Image (tube, helix red, strand yellow):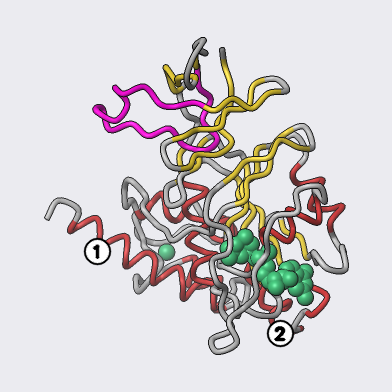
């Protein structure tokens, strides 16, 4: 039989097939081969008269994200909070890169619009104006229709810092779930990592995955050319003088010109430089 892993905990995999959820164990050989089934995997399994069903095969993955491990994602819903916790813009940018390198479409979601800090809303628009994006509130339900439209028929995975409201948005979209949501710690205004496991919920003709947020970030290759392709902003730039321009300190750079003309978010650009330098560093030290 064929099914989709919706949850994996303690060596058990919960596989959705038709209207049923079947508890499975993975075949022993997977561990030997270093293969771990993950949430979102399409699998072939067999049922036995006694004991647990067994996952025999993992069907080819379209993509795989790690920490938390999820597979076969169409869209990554990258959630930021317009209030607390303070947005980790760098994490959001890295999640975009992670998504794009894995051929997953990023959708930027700014939650807590009911308490929205206008400066954050403005920064969000400036940074992500060229991305599909929605401003929403799990509390007031503003923007939820738009969010649902972005999800329809796709396998969508929530990602982002603890306490930005990923589980709250899941609950707002699918009230029957009643997932646990957490408070912010009083001292640091950060989240408490309430969600512990990735879990997939079929809905809207596709599925939604709640996750504990991504700790990031492990591209398989550190190719600066591919990194640049993750920045739709750059496609508006005139060609650079030097082929292979990193858009950092080279003369005659089209991206720098864009920046000087005020057509590129300085904050996004600064974070790009940091990520690009990190790519260069890691590429050079990959085989150390
Ligand atoms: N004002 C306001 N608060 C919200 C909104 N959405 C979530 N919250 C609050 O934010 C806190 C964290 O919400 P969660 O849904 O647990 O956040 P999470 O992203 O799932 O966090 P982790 O599971 O720890 O990764 C809770 O206290 C929620 O009530 C919103 O739209 N507006
Ligand atoms: Mg959560
Ligand atoms: Zn350049």
The spot of residue 57 in percent (x, y) is 42, 18
Please rate how many residues cluster around mark 1, counting C-alpha atoms within 10 Å: few if below 14, some from 14 to 19, many from 20: few
Residue 165: tell me if it is visible: no
CA distance separating discs 1 and 2: 33 Å
Please rate how many residues cluster around mark 2, counting C-alpha atoms within 10 Å: few if below 14, some from 14 to 19, many from 20: few
31 part of magenta stretch: yes
Q: Which mark is residue 281?
A: 1
The spot of residue 178 in percent (x, y) is 75, 54
Is the distance from the Cβ of mark 1 to the nearest ligand 3 atom less than 8 Å? no
Q: Residue at x 52, y 40 (%)?
A: 103
Q: Residue at x 57, y 73 (%)?
A: 191
Where does the magenta region start and end?
24-44
77 part of magenta stretch: no
Q: Is residue 248 above or below residue 62?
A: below
- Image quarter (top left, top right, bottom left or bottom right) of the C terminus: bottom left
The spot of residue 239 in percent (x, y) is 48, 57
Q: Earlier in the sequence, mark 1 or mark 2?
A: 2
The residue labelled by disc 2 is 119
Q: Residue at x 57, y 68 (%)?
A: 162
The image quadrant in which ligand 3 is located: bottom left
Image quadrant in which you'd find residue 85: bottom right
Q: Nearer the viewer, residue 98 or 184?
A: 184
């Amino acid at each position: 039989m064929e099914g989709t892993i919706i949850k994996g905990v303690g060596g058990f995999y919960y596989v959705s097939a038709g209207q049923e959820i079947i508890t499975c164990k993975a075949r022993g050989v997977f561990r030997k081969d270093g293969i771990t089934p993950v949430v979102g995997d399409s699998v072939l399994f067999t049922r036995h008269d006694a004991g647990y069903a067994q996952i025999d095969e993992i069907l080819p993955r379209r993509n795989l994200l790690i920490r938390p491990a999820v597979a076969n994602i169409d869209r990554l819903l990258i959630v930021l909070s317009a209030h607390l916790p303070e947005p980790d813009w760098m994490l959001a940018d890295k999640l975009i890169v992670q998504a794009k390198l894995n051929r997953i479409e990023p959708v930027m979601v700014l939650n807590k619009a009911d308490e929205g800090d206008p400066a954050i809303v403005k920064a969000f628009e400036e940074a992500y104006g060229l991305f599909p994006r929605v401003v929403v509130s799990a509390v007031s339900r503003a923007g939820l229709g738009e969010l649902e439209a972005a999800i329809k028929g796709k396998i969508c995975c929530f990602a982002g810092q603890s306490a930005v409201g990923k589980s709250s948005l899941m609950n707002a979209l699918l009230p029957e779930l009643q997932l646990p949501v957490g408070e912010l710690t009083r001292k640091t205004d950060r989240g408490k990592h309430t969600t512990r496991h990735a879990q997939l919920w079929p809905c809207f003709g596709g599925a939604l995955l709640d996750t504990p947020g991504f700790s990031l970030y492990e591209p398989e290759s550190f190719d600066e050319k591919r990194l640049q392709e993750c920045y739709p902003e750059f496609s508006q730039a005139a060609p650079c003088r030097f082929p292979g321009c990193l858009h950092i300190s080279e003369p005659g750079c089209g991206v720098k010109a864009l920046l000087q003309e005020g057509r590129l978010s300085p904050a996004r650009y600064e974070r790009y430089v940091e990520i690009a330098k990190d790519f260069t560093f890691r590429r050079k030290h990959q085989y150390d």
